[in-house]
Structure formats: structure tokens, C-alpha cells
Image: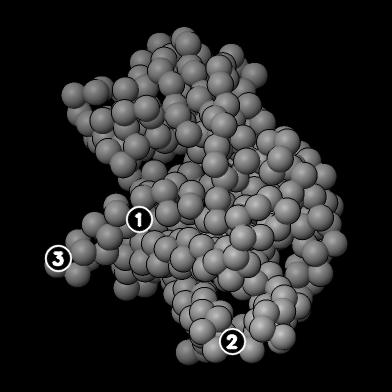
Amino acid sequence: MSFDLTSEQRQFRDMMRNFVDERVAPHAAEYDRSQEFPWKSYDACRELELPSLGIPTQYGGAGADMVTQAIMAEEIARGCASTAVTILISKLGMLPVMNFGSEELKREYLPKVASGEIQSSYCLSEADAGSDVASMRCRAVRDGDDYILNGSKYWITNSEISDTYTVFATVDPTLRSRGITAFLVKKSWGLKFPNHEDKMGLRASPTGEVVFDNVRVPATHRIGAEGEGFKIAMHTLDRSRPTIGAQAIGIAQAGIDYAGGYMKERKAFGAPIANLQGLRFMLADMAIRTEAARALVYRACAQIDAGDPDGTLTYLGAAAKSFASDTAMSVATDAVQLLGGYGFTKDFPVERFMRDAKITQIYEGTNQVQRVVVAKHLLK
């Protein structure tokens, strides 16, 4: 068992680091201020064929292992957390298709996502159905060879930007989780986007409501069988949460890098503040927690690559996501503290790191829910 990266993964990490520093990080503050989709950064990622990383080779992708995908997520998030989400979200939207979709759906959509020609979103949460997914009200009614979708989804990443939406709707609300069914829905079929949220962080990643008003979806675009949607949703999130952990690690690493550089330049009492033991220990603790989180994320990713042989992925994914995101929030807050008053201003990026870190504790399952998952595994 190896706890180190392969030479290929190290080379990929170094390449990604240089790429992000040159093509992504310089635009991060601008897009954060404007709340515009980070097209310059996304197009740069597309030039490097990064959207293909998580797509199987038989459908035009690179078929990269999950640890390599985590490295990508971390390095992009180190430069711009919003841009990292634009790359990760299409993989999340396509995971149900990859693992449960028909061959026709795979061949029609996966190559387009791999090339970056189209983007995809994941529509699970509703206004009153976030952590309690089984209480969703979005309804799918069979009508001949189609389904008619009515309802709305909230907190949807890439709202209006994406071309396809993986939508979870119930065919019978009385069945709760047993009625949930998954569909792949094209934006051109009449989806509505009434609003975008004005968020604290990830401001360049659009988040909004998606409304379905008698949207007709061919039965060929159902993913899996009726009633399998809840299983598909949970299976998907187990395989996506570790990359949210990787995004969080990237934010934390950005805080460490910037605060460390600042400490060597900023002087107090006639010497760099890097000489002050109290501050040195703060930076050391930031690095220790981040390194531990990185190891846990890689462990969860390796479990995915191995096919989850001992059935612990749900537990490991929850542990990795919650620990890494808690670490990111803690480290980013300490980075602000190390910069003092400057850290509290928008002239320096650490306040953005702190704002961006917060959502990693909330989306793809709050950290409180992740602890429920961990405890359930321990007490089964």
C-alpha cells in the first residue's frame, strides 16, 4: 500500500500548479467581484481538456483515476474555487448517466461533456427538501412515451449555464424515497430560471432555481428504473463528496501559501512577523490539518478507484468531505487572522478564501449530515 503519489500524478500536479497560476488565479478576484461565470478560466481548462478527466475513455474522456481528479480539483480551487466548481459540476451531473444510464444516453452526452462542448448540472435539492431528500415534491407523471415534470429545484450549481440537468423527481409522493426517479433533461425542453442567488462565496459560480412547468421528457431519458432515483442520488454523492474535500483542501492551501508569504514580508517590532513563535505555530497547525485532510481525501478517492471492495466508501467519503471542509474553514479564518486588519479587506485574497470555504461545509450534504453517516457506520 502506497501513501505517495505516482510519478505521473506528481507531474500532473506540477503542470496543474503552473497552469492555475498563469491562467486561472489572475482572474479570480475579478470574477468574484462581478459574479460573472468565469469563462476565461473555464475556456482555459477546456483547452487543457480538463473536463474529460472524469469521463471514461470509451466515451471520449481521459478516464483518469480519482486521485488524479482530486489533484485537479485541489489545484484549480487553490487559484479559484468558483472555477473548480465549474469543472466538477458536469462530472457530478453525468455520474448517474455513467453508472446507471442507458448506452444511448452515454453515447449521446458523455463525449460532449468530455470535450467541454456542453455542461451539466445536478438537480436534487428543493426549497423544503435539502437534507431530507425523500420529502421532495417535484413530480414526474408518465404520459405515453414521455414523463411530464412539474416542480422546482433550488441551490442548483450552473443554473442556466448548463445544457443538461440530471433531475430527481417522484412518481408517487406517498412512496417517499421509493418513488424518486432520475431523468436527464435538456435546457432546450423549456426549463425556466427565475433567479440567481447573491451569495457570500463562490460568487462566480451561478446558483439558482430551476423550474419545470409541464416539461415533457422522453422515457428514453429516464436514468435507471422508476423508483431507483434515491439509490442513484446517494451512490453519486458518495463518489462526488471526496472531490468537494479536494476543493476545500485547495482553498486551505491557498490560505497557507498567502499567509506564509505575507509573514515573511510583514515586519513588526523590527523583524518579519514570521519570527514570532505564536504566529509560526498558527501556520504550522494550518499546514498539519491540511496535510491530514489531503491524506483522508486521497484515501476516499483510492477507495472509489478500487471499486469499494469492503463497502466503506459512504463512511470514508463523509469523513473526508466533512474533515476537509472544516479544515478549510478553520485554515482560511486563521489566514485572515495572520494578516490582521489587511486580511479583513478585499485588497487581499484571504477574505475570499474564507467566504469560499464556508459553502464546502454545506453543499453535497451538510457536515452535520456527514456526521450522521459516520456515526451510523460506527454503530451498525
* Residue in the picture at 31% in, 28% down: 128
How far apart are labels 3 and 1 at the CA level? 20 Å
Q: Earlier in the sequence, mark 2 or mark 3?
A: 2
Residue where numbered disc 2 is placed: 276
How far apart are labels 2 and 3 at the CA level? 48 Å
* Residue in the picture at 75% in, 70% down: 17
Taking the image as shown, residue 13 lies to the left or right of residue 196, namely right
Q: Are marks 3 and 1 in contact (CB under 8 Å)?
A: no
Tell which of 241 and 249 is nearer to you.
Answer: 249
Q: Earlier in the sequence, mark 1 or mark 2?
A: 2
Quarter in which the C terminus is drawn: bottom left
* Label 3 crowd (10 A; few <14 / some 14-19 / many >=20): few
Residue type at the position of mark 3: Lys
Residue at the extreme front: 269
Label 1, secondary structure: give it: helix
Residue where numbered disc 3 is placed: 380
Classify 192 as above or below 275.
above
Q: Are marks 2 and 3 in contact (CB under 8 Å)?
A: no
Taking the image as shown, residue 242 lies to the left or right of residue 259, namely left
Residue type at the position of mark 2: Leu
Residue type at the position of mark 1: Asn
* Label 1 crowd (10 A; few <14 / some 14-19 / many >=20): many
In this rendering, the label closer to the viewer, 2 or 3: 2
In this rendering, the label closer to the viewer, 3 or 1: 1
Residue where numbered disc 1 is placed: 367
Q: Residue 271, image x and y in percent?
A: 71, 86
Residue at the extreme left: 379
* Residue in the picture at 72% in, 79% down: 267
Q: Is residue 215 visible?
A: yes
Classify 219 as above or below 248.
above
